[in-house]
Image (cartoon, grey):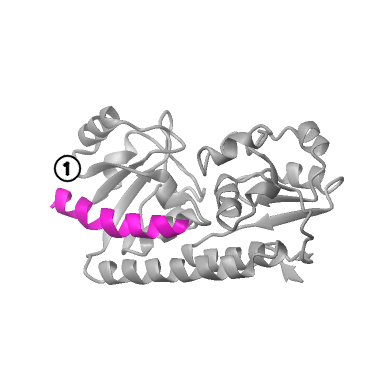
Amino acid sequence: MVTDAIGQAHARAGDDARIVALVPSITELLFELGLGEQVVGRTGFCIHPRGAVRAVPKLGGTKDVDLAALRALAPSHVIVNVDENERATYEALCEFVPHVVVTHPNAPDDNLELYRLLGTIFGREREAARLGERFCAARARLAAVAAELPPRRVLYLIWRQPWMSISADTYIARMLGLVQWQVVRPHDGARYPQVAAAELASLEPDLVLLSSEPYPFRDKHVAELEATCAAPGRVHLVDGEMLSWYGSRAVAGLDYLAGTAPRLLETAA
């Protein structure tokens, strides 16, 4: 038995397990663990690994799952996430899915438990252990880089009209914290707070990072923010998948941050 993020115990699944993943990073992780042939459903946002997922039926989005289509697939296991899926979806799934596995990695190091959870349930312990070793190696490489970097205050934006940022209680913020970058935000208590245009400059960030997702920020938005925040050279586009996706993508994400952080600091100097 192994326990998921909300304390539910799960026994080892059989080789005939039929898995639906309602979390993009989890779908990618399942393929990485060698379970691609058992993934029978996904969301439209589950786009990795590209090519391989095209054969897997789409079931709507993470927030608007097509429950009727999902039921028709007769999954034995559905994997959800506390942040990305609605509680009402979880409760509905529990009525007809034998095993609903809940995940909630909220910091980079939580990936090790995530690998162990899914590796144990689906009989991929060796694959999960190897992935964990790769994660730890990338974590060590990043730590060596971070030791040479100064602390910085960072405004990380994920949306426009309205501007939206992140709080310290998020996976992204803890990822950035690995290189001593502290996120700044309005003090409204939200995990993903709105930021009034007039507040942007008053937050006085050392760096402004524009994520490639969920809003598709472009170069024109860099120019807009440089003018708004009076921050020429301190506004940058970053790969949101690398900084926000957990699972197997987290390994590449750690190396991405190790390479990106020094470069952005040089530009802002």
Q: Main secondary structure of the magenta part?
A: helix
Dot 1 crowding, Cα within 10 Å, few <14, some 14–19, many 20+: some
Asked whether 60 or 266 is in front, the reply is 60
Magenta segment: does it hold 257?
yes
Where residue 225 sits in the image (x, y, percent)?
A: 26, 34
Please indicate whether residue 194 sits to the left or right of residue 42 in the image: left
Front-most of 204 and 18? 18
Report the residue at 54% width, 68% height from top.
112
- Residue occupying the point 53% across, 56% down: 247
Is residue 261 shown above or below 219?
Answer: below
Q: Residue 256 falls in which quadrant of the image? A: bottom left
Q: Is residue 253 a member of the stretch shown in magenta?
A: yes
Q: Residue at x 26, y 58 (%)?
A: 152
Q: Which residue is mark 1?
A: 233
Q: Is residue 43 visible?
A: yes
The residue most toward the left is: 269
In the rendered picture of this protein, how many numbered marks are placed on residues? Answer: 1
Q: Amino acid at mark 1?
A: Gly
- Image x and y of residue 267, in percent: 15, 48
Which residue is more in the foreground, 117 or 180? Answer: 117
Residue numbers of the magenta segment: 250-269
Say left or right for 182 vs 214: left
Question: x, y percentage for residue 199?
Answer: 33, 39
Compared with residue 200, is residue 141 higher up or lower down, i.e. above or below?
below
